[in-house]
Image (spheres, helix red, strand yellow):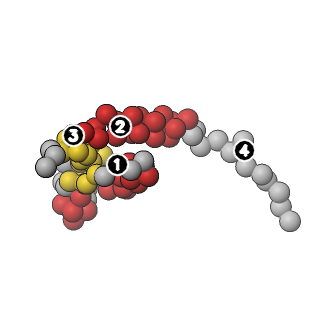
Amino acid sequence: MSNLSKLKTCNSDFEAQVLKGSLNAEGIACMLGNENITNLYHGVISAFTGVDVLVRDEDYEKAHEVMMKAESEEVQRDGSLENVDWSFG
């Protein structure tokens, strides 16, 4: 049986779910810790705990690479509308 390591503590359930989706898409199994307590007491407990993304020890390196890639892609999306086709009618 393998041990679990905390990859990241996310500020919200949404952020944790997005990361979980990215990891699952790469074939990396993960689980979320504190998810239920954070959802139940959102705004109170989440300020202190967050949602932990846990991966198996043997998947940690690959999971970290996936996380870093996902975060760098997120930073590159600056919210600009330069690539939007503005045709009306």
Going by the picture, which residue comes out furthest to the front? Answer: 1
Residue drawn at x 28%, y 51% as measured from the top left: 30
Marks 2/3 in contact by CB < 8 Å: the verdict is: no
Q: CA distance from mark 1 to mark 4?
A: 32 Å
Q: Secondary structure at mark 1?
A: loop
Q: Is residue 29 left or right of residue 86?
A: left
Q: CA distance from mark 2 to mark 3?
A: 10 Å
Q: CA distance from mark 1 to mark 3?
A: 11 Å
Residue drawn at x 57%, y 40% as measured from the top left: 77
Query: What percent of the width, then of the height, locates residue 53?
Result: 27, 48
The amino acid on which the numbered mark 3 sits, given as a three-letter code, is Asp
Label 1 belongs to which residue? 28
Q: Nearer the viewer, residue 37 or 55?
A: 55
Query: What percent of the width, then of the height, locates residue 79?
Result: 59, 43
Query: What percent of the width, then of the height, locates residue 59?
Result: 29, 41
Marks 1/4 in contact by CB < 8 Å: the verdict is: no
Q: Secondary structure at mark 3?
A: helix
Label 4 belongs to which residue? 83
Residue drawn at x 52%, y 38% as measured from the top left: 73
Label 2 belongs to which residue? 62
